[in-house]
Each structure stands twice: as structure tokens, then as C-alpha cells.
Image (spheres, helix red, strand yellow):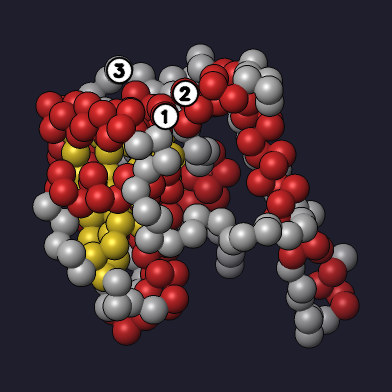
Amino acid sequence: MGGKVRFGGSAGMTTVTEAVLRRRSTRAFLDRPVAESLVREILDVARRAPSGGNMQPWRVWVVAGEEQKRLRAVAKARMMENPAGDDAEYKIYPDNLWEPHRSWRYKCGEDMYALLGIPRENKFARLLRLAENYDFFGAPVGLFFAIDRRMQPGQWADLGMFIQTVMLLAEERGLATCAQEAWSMLHKTVAEFVAMPPELMLFCGMALGYADNDAAVNRLVTDRAPFDEVFTLRGFPAVDRN
């Protein structure tokens, strides 16, 4: 028999489905600390994420407290020196983005800025909002995910599954997250700060903490394409389609 698997303590039982549906890219957090033991627990369980050949290609750094404050100050100073950031090590988005991906990305941005009351012509306000990435949107914990430069697309997929696992485990525990590719624009700064070995490439950061549910930006729920637009199912008996 099929059924929903519930996990978590008796105080807050959560299904996998509920965690997936609740997860959002949270962009405003409460000034409320997250216990180190909770972060360790999430990462410890996330080690069970799948990877081809059990290669486990992820490497993670976590910053909180005074260490995070120091990093945020360094990041802001670097962005003041060079608003364009470091030379990119990979393209976050392809050149000349095509449809329907271009429209999906455009609408996501416009919906977010509409909630914030920032019109398209106010470029400065939008840049200031982008810079909030480097404050982890006020989250008390920041994570950095890296991968060895010699790894191939299969291992990058593994890294993505690991990151998703971290986000769902955080959701189960009442925490919120935002994966932040924006940190790749400051990869040199991050690598220097955490003493990242040169053979590793920073993929992204992540904000982790308790969501500020009163913040307008956290009301954003992005669209998803219709089922039949992206999924093709073949071979099932016709009776199963009723």
C-alpha cells in the first residue's frame, strides 16, 4: 500500500510531501539563532543523499555568529570595490536564454519585486536588494557548497540532490532556507575567508534560519509549468488514467 512517510518528533510530524510543498526560497529571516546541534543534525542526516558510485562530491562550510558577521563585512567591502564581483567560474544562466525558461525566470523576478514595491525602472533599489544576498537575508547561519573542479556533470547533479536534501531536512525542523548562487559572484572572497582548497569550486551559498513570516517577500510562491508540459508518461494501462 502506498502512503505518506512521516518523520520528525511528536511535536511536529511532517510528511515528505509537506516539506516539498512548504519549501520556499526565503529572503527574510528572524533575528533568532539556530543551535549548532541542529545544524550538525541536518548535515549529518543529509550525508545519506544519493550520489553515483557513492562519490559524495560535496564539501560544505558553515558560518554563524561573529564569523558570519566578519564575512558579511568583507563581502560588502569587496562589492563596494568591484560591484561586478569576481570573474565568474561558471555561468549561472545560459547566454540568450530561450523560451519558456526566459519567461519563467522573468516572471519570478517581477513577482518578487512587485511584492517589495520596487518598479523595474528603480535599478538602484533592485541592486540594493540583490546585495542583501551577502547578508544572507538576515539569516543567522550561512552555508557554502563546493565541488572539486575535476568532477563531471553527474557529480554536479549529486551536489544538487545533497543541497535539496539539506533544504527539506531544514523544513522538517521548522527552519527555512534560500539557496544563493549570488555567492558565486564572490567566490574568491569566500574561498579566501574559509580557506577553501584551490582544487574546489564554490557552487553556491545558502541562508538558513527561521523565516520572517510577516515579510512581504516571503509571500512569493513561484509558478510551475503544467504537468503535461514537462512530463511524458508512456506504457501505463488506460484504466490507470481515470
Residue 76, above or below 151: above
Q: Which residue is mark 1?
A: 131
Left or right: residue 141 versus residue 181 is left
Q: In the figure, residue 109 lies in which quadrant? A: top right
Question: Residue 199 appears at what percent x and percent y?
Answer: 20, 69
Residue found 73% across the figure and 60% down from its top = 98
In the depicted structure, whether residue 146 falls above or below residue 57: above
1 to the left or right of 231: left
- Mark pair 2, 1: CA separation: 5 Å
Residue at the image position 32 percent from the left and 84 percent from the top: 53
Question: Judging from the image, what secondary structure is the residue with disc 1 in?
Answer: helix
Q: CA distance from mark 1 to mark 3?
A: 19 Å
Disc 2: which residue = 128
Number of marks present in the image shown: 3
Q: Are marks 2 and 1 in contact (CB under 8 Å)?
A: yes
Residue shown at 84% from the left, 69% from the top: 241
